[in-house]
Amino acid sequence: MAKDIPVYVFTGFMDSGKTTLIQETLFENDFTQGGDDKILIIACEDGDVEYDIEKLKTVNAKVTMIENEEDFNLKNLTEIQNEFKPDVIFLEYNGTWGVDHIYDEELPEGWVPAQSLATVDATTFENYLNNMRTMMMEQLFKAEVVIFNRCTDATPKTKFRGQIKSMNRPAQIVYERADGSIDDSPEELPFDLDADVIEITDADYALWFMDCMETPKKYDGKTVHFKGLVYNPNDGKLRRDVFVPGRFAMTCCVEDIQFLGMKCKWDKASTLGHRSWIDITATIRVEFAKEYKGKGPVLYPTEVLSAEKPEDELVYFS
């Protein structure tokens, strides 16, 4: 039986900082301290930053290249395994290749995914997102940790977090400044949390929804107002005093449109037509809900009014 070999996967576009992160992990973060494991870096692209081969020798690490996407297959990976016999693998994946090679295809026996990290250059993220959204998001949608590097005071962290969470909700997001320090300053929200009634515009709905679902406690007891589409099918899935107001949001492309809605308890819920539009003012209470499989935000309306369908029915994370 083959021994388990942990594989650390690093994804992200070229020049997003993958090579730098790998070397920082090996040289500065005590990854190799006290051990004599043989570490193999499998690099699938040749970026601006080069590996310090001589320094890598001091931590018992070597580098090998896979230059073509068609060569990232079980046969070649097994040959690499047999040649280097590593104890640990760092995989620097090519930012233009489909990630299905990593997650959906067979890997050599014993290779065990240990952690998946994605690096993002905060200074170019929006440009890539606007022009190559699907390709960009593919590099991030299965990452356990997403690291935005080269952040400044002007980096729209809340917007970036919403865009990542829209298609990878479990991801941990880290913001790193150009000097390598972690930016843990509070994120600015586009609405006033201290207002008597928090006004959620169509433009801000997606960000508000993700923030409320991720950090519900700060909304507990707050009152919000927004325009929503009613989910209230007469199919027995919801109790008569429950409906779900929300909006359809586009993440990557039309194929990835999803409904972002919150559970709402109201004694007149059964009077609302399925897919009707409403203006809703409601107080948020954080409580257990089976739909959330735990505690989450539940809306208790103070006012529900009929509303006109908006010109654009979709909301966006931008």
Image (cartoon, grey):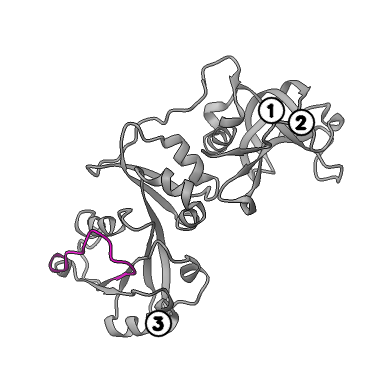
14 relative position to 276: left or right:
left
Say which label, 1 or 2, has the lower sequence index: 1
Where 33 sits versus 181, above or below? below
Residue type at mark 3: give it.
Ala
Between marks 3 and 2 in the image, the one whose residue lies nearer the viewer: 2
Residue position for label 3: 2
Q: Is residue 43 magenta?
A: yes
Residue position for label 1: 227
Residue 289 point in image, percent of width and height = 68, 39
Classed neighbour count for the residue bearing mark 3: other residues with Cα under 10 Å, few (<14), some (14–19), many (≥20): few
Residue 314 point in image, percent of width and height = 65, 39
Q: Quadrant of residue 305?
A: top right
Q: Is residue 189 magenta?
A: no
Secondary structure under badge 2? strand
Q: CA distance from mark 3 to mark 2?
A: 58 Å
Residue position for label 2: 277
Between marks 3 and 1 in the image, the one whose residue lies nearer the viewer: 1
Residue type at mark 1: give it.
Lys
Where 29 sits versus 272, above or below? below
Q: Are marks 1 and 2 in contact (CB under 8 Å)?
A: yes
Q: Quadrant of residue 45?
A: bottom left
Check the image and name the residue furthest to the top: 196
Q: CA distance from mark 3 to mark 1?
A: 57 Å
Secondary structure under badge 3? loop
Residue type at mark 2: give it.
Trp
238 relative position to 1: left or right:
right
